[in-house]
Amino acid sequence: MLPIDMKQFPVEILTPELVLIGFAFMILLVGAFSRTAESRLYAGLMAASGLVIAGLFALHAYGVKAEAFYGAYQLDSFGVFLKVVILAGTFITTLLSMDYLRRSDIQIYEYYSLLLFAAVGMMLLVSCADLISILIAIEIMSLSVYVLVGIRRDEPFATEAALKYFILGSFASGILVYGIAMVYGAAESINLNQIASAVMRGTIQEPKLFAIGIGLILVGFGFKIASVPFHMWAPDVYQGAPAPITGFMSMGVKAAAFGAAIRVFAIAFGNNISDWQPILWWLAVLTMLGGNLMALMQQNIKRMLAYSSIAHAGYILVGLAVGTLQAGAAMLFYLAAYAFMNLGAFGVIVAVSGGEKELENIPDWSGLAYRYPLLGAAMALCLFSLIGMPPTGGFFAKFYLFYSAVAAGDVPIVVIGVIASMISLYFYLKVIVYMYMRDPEREIVPAAPNLSVRLGVLLASCAVLYLGILPGSVLGWATSSMATLF
């Protein structure tokens, strides 16, 4: 029997994830033994409480550097930063879901448990330090999100979206496995630090096989972040999923996948930057332009925000293509700002959507700002932030990202990014024009949002304003967090 070093299995560094797992099982037990109206409310409160407790434990771990499971799991400030973003976004998603689930008659207990399990997968993903644990974390996250997308089992479009997401996600995982196998065959290790050491020592067995493996891993991550040309699943899935889950996916999956990609390419493949940097450069350009151009033609607001999400993945890819510490810190700040401005936009969609049908077509939003002035203002704020206009978090996120690219000498990609942002003005402002400057084309009575939905939108809006007015503290946190990888 092989000796087992129990010091490699410290439970305390996994406390935030274990808290969420415990609350997820508690919610399932409550659902199994109680089906009253009060217990349905308690399920949402339990999920929110678990997220708050996990967030406190995560913040307590900031500044700690430790590893476990023989180097497969790395606790550092980089992972803690993204975990806080994921937990905050999941908390807002929980607030948005409480009344939405009641109106849509969705299985509440399974929903909240799957939401917490998905968050656990995302949190593990940003701290994994070898390729196999990254794959396992991706599957924990993805399997939960697949079910959440299709949780409205009586909606054919939701079922279709979940099936498309599952099939294409399975292909992406398969491609990722092939890439991991090739990297392992060439480097004789799956640990990110050991792969980097093998590259530095010049002991890579098959350099061409290693390069192909890097390319396949890049394709796998490309599917998860929905970059062009691996974006084909996003519009249908975003449209078919429940509105809170669409916001959760656009925030959490993107933050977790980018976190893992930054760790892999900064640590394991950092010495091979000349191999993958040109590919990432073109991926960023195609994704920025492609996402914004395709969004121009959309009349469905969720599909429009889906293509917007693709475009923003392109902006974030600019930082990865630049590959500097400053660009990495700008990426973390961008992921935080994007999480809140996108959740705020989807929160308003949840707030005005009825149980039978969501207010998805942009013309249906005509005159909505006069019926709900505060929600209209929140939607306008989040859309201005998505454009990148001051004084919002989106403005400083783009500014820092483009500034880092200019500092690295990559002016052409900044010019393309600015052009892409100018294209986005049309479809974002179109929603604002309909809300404030158009009379309703037909009589629509949107749902009256309850307290939890209003609170979720308020928190997201305040975060967008805070990151726009006082960005220094969060940017400093992002910079010190990114420095732990170098």
Image (tube, rainbow, N blue to C red):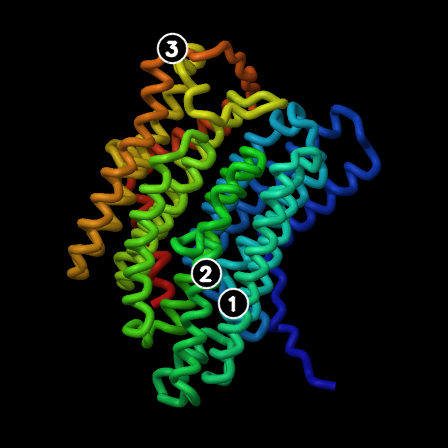
What residue lies at 45% left-to-right and 36% top-to-bottom?
303
Residue contact between numbered discs 3 and 1, judged by CB atoms under 8 Å: no
**Residue 259 shown left or right of residue 135 in the figure:** left
Give the structural element (helix, strand or loop) at label 1.
helix
Residue highlighted by disc 3: 439
Q: Which disc is residue 221 wearing?
A: 2
Q: Nearer the viewer, mark 3 or mark 1?
A: 3
Tell me: residue 10, above or below residue 455: below
Residue highlighted by disc 1: 176
Inter-mark Cα distance, 2 to 3: 43 Å
Tell me: residue 144, above or below residue 159: below
Q: Residue 116: which quarter of the image?
A: top right
Quick one: 362 or 483, which is closer to the camera? 362
- Amino acid at dot 1: Leu
Give the structural element (helix, strand or loop) at label 2.
helix
Residue placed furthest toward the right: 33
What residue lies at 41% left-to-right and 84% top-to-bottom?
198
Residue 224: where, in percent of width, then height? Answer: 48, 55
Residue 155: where, in percent of width, then height? Answer: 66, 34
For the residue carrying disc 1, how many other residues have a C-alpha within 10 Å: few (<14), some (14-19), or many (20+)? many
Is residue 151 visible from the viewing direction of this image?
Answer: yes
Instruction: Indicate the quadrant containing the C terminus: top left, top right, bottom left or bottom right.
Output: bottom left
Residue contact between numbered discs 1 and 2, judged by CB atoms under 8 Å: yes
